[in-house]
Image: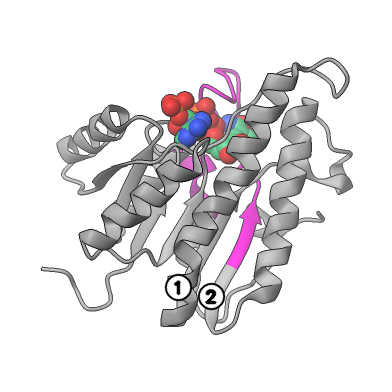
Amino acid sequence: MRHAMQRTVLITGANRGIGLATARALSGAGMRVVLSARRFEDAVRAVDELAREKLVAVASELDLEREASVLECAKELAARRIEVDALVNNGAVLFEGDALTTSSQNFRTAFEVNVLGALWCCRAFVPAMLARGYGRVVNVSSGWGAFAEDLEGPASYSITKAALNALTVSLARSFVGDVKANACCPGWVRTRMGGADAELSPEEGARDVVWLATLASDGPNGGFFRNRERIAW
Ligand code: NAP
């Protein structure tokens, strides 16, 4: 039976890496987790992996590149009476290259997934949060998307993460009630994106994400964090 105060979190790109580590941590902490992935079978595989650890999650298909897929996911969850209290915009792509030479297709995909995908998710799930007066949006960003850190990293990645940061500020400003949007940089994390030499485990990389998804009412809104400390945009 669902506990009266049990919150539900939807995580995008949760089939591996930081997204899966976030799902594991939040499920372990007692939240209801909707583990979404671009391909349904990958979501199911990850849910099965958690089940072997005695953790519960609901598998859902959500392809950030297609707004229709986001809407379909929202419709399906609504039909199952699953209300999303927290949204973790985690799924992302990284393509190497600078602004002048990255292929137009890769640039387009980076914007579709890293920026518009997060926006479609916000539009699908945040209005209900505002109506209920509670919500947490966590945009998994990167220091490479920070002007303050010189927008380092491949151009299509840093530019789209800067845009995700801008979305965070814009959203947060419009929120009322106990609804918050924050961004974080997980650090350099050992995932397919971060590579084998990265310094942090996926679990360590998920720490700020978990914290922001479960923020208390007196927590921040519209901030950018690394290791729970505010960093400059
Ligand atoms: P990862 O292991 O490569 O995972 C990326 C996830 O995004 C995968 O689940 C991938 O799904 C998903 N994704 C890609 N395109 C998608 C789409 N169209 N629809 C839905 N999901 C999609 O990378 P990660 O390191 O865990 O990255 C997680 C987040 O942390 C990202 O936002 C990344 O930018 C950020 N980050 C990572 C690092 C780092 O060092 N690793 C540093 C700073 C920020 P598929 O399996 O289907 O491809």
| Quarter of the figure with residue 224 | bottom right
Sequence-first tag of 2 and 1: 1
For the question of whether residue 54 can be seen, the reply is yes
In the displayed structure image, the side of residue 90 where residue 80 appears, left or right = left
x and y, in percent, of residue 18 in the image: 48, 38
> Most prominent secondary structure in the magenta stretch?
loop
Report which residue position mark 2 lands on.
Answer: 179
User: Answer yes or no: do the residues labelled 2 and 1 have beta carbons within 8 Å?
Assistant: yes
Q: Is residue 213 above or below residue 144?
A: below
Q: Is mark 1 on a helix, strand or loop?
A: helix
Instruction: Inspect the magenta stretch and tell me whether residue 57 lies in it.
Output: no
Which residues, given as a range, are shown in magenta? 181-208
Instruction: Say which residue label 1 marks.
Output: 129
Task: Name above or below for residue 32 compared with residue 191.
Answer: below
Q: In the displayed structure, does residue 72 sit left or right of residue 200?
A: left
Q: Residue at x 49, y 77 (%)?
A: 130
Relative to the observer, which residue lies in front, 66 or 49?
Answer: 66
